[in-house]
Image (cartoon, grey):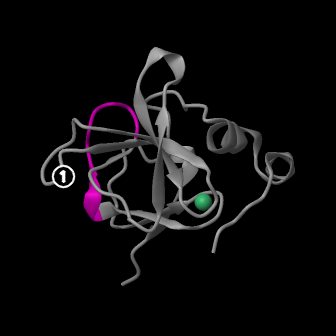
Amino acid sequence: KIVDIPNEEWKLILPPDLYAVAREAATERPFTGKYNDFDVNGEYYCAVCGNHLFGSTAKFASSCGWPSFFEADKNGVKYTRDSSHGMERIEVLCKRCNSHLGHVFNDGPVPTWVRYCMNSISLDFQRDKK
Ligand code: FE
């Protein structure tokens, strides 16, 4: 089910730093996010709406300064062209609530060769239960 809430309402609900990234497509500073240098088995969800986005099995150490994944949940994300800041990039958004997550690039590792470059603040992590 789609979550369709206008930004004026999100601004009242979300912490300012999450609002800036998720709803205004800001980028957190590299090497500062809580999931950049982080390798624990579990699942990653949209920090805004809880939609499932990534599994830790698709996470890899990219050294770019942001948490990186080689594969996303097909039902979790959607894509749009982003021509901002003088670059041509593919923006990655939550399929459920339309929040900005990051970008995807064609310089990833096997098996997909793509790199989902995500903002930590846009993600919520849940450790695998044993
Ligand atoms: Fe979401």
Pick the residue in front: 41 or 105: 105
Q: Hey, which quadrant is residue 19 in on the image?
A: top right
The picture quadrant where one finds residue 50 is bottom right
Q: In the rendered image of this protein, does residue 116 appear above or below residue 31?
A: below
For the view shown, which residue lies furthest in the left direction? 110
Count numbered badges in the picture.
1
**From the viewer's perspective, is 130 left or right of 1?**
left
Name the residue type under label 1.
Answer: Thr
In the depicted structure, whether residue 63 falls above or below residue 100 = above
Across and down, in percent, residue 45 comes to 51, 63
Q: Residues within 10 Å of mark 1 (few under 14, many from 20)?
A: few
Q: Is mark 1 within 8 Å of ligand 1?
A: no
| Quarter of the N terminus within the rendering | bottom right
Quadrant containing the C terminus is: bottom left
Residue at which label 1 appears: 112
Highlighted magenta segment, given as a residue range: 57-66
Q: Position of residue 101 (x, y in %)?
A: 52, 46
- The question of residue 55 being in magenta is answered with no
Where is ligand 1, by quadrant? bottom right
Q: Eyeballing the image, is 96 above or below 104? A: below
SS assignment for the magenta stretch, majority: loop
Residue 119 visible to an observer of this rendering: no
Q: Residue at x 56, y 49 (%)?
A: 122
Residue 121 horizontal side relative to residue 58, left or right = right
Q: Secondary structure at mark 1?
A: loop
Q: Is residue 90 visible?
A: yes
Residue 4 at x, y percent in the picture: 73, 61
Instruction: Check if residue 60 falls in the magenta segment.
Output: yes
In the displayed structure, 32 sits above or below 67; it is: above
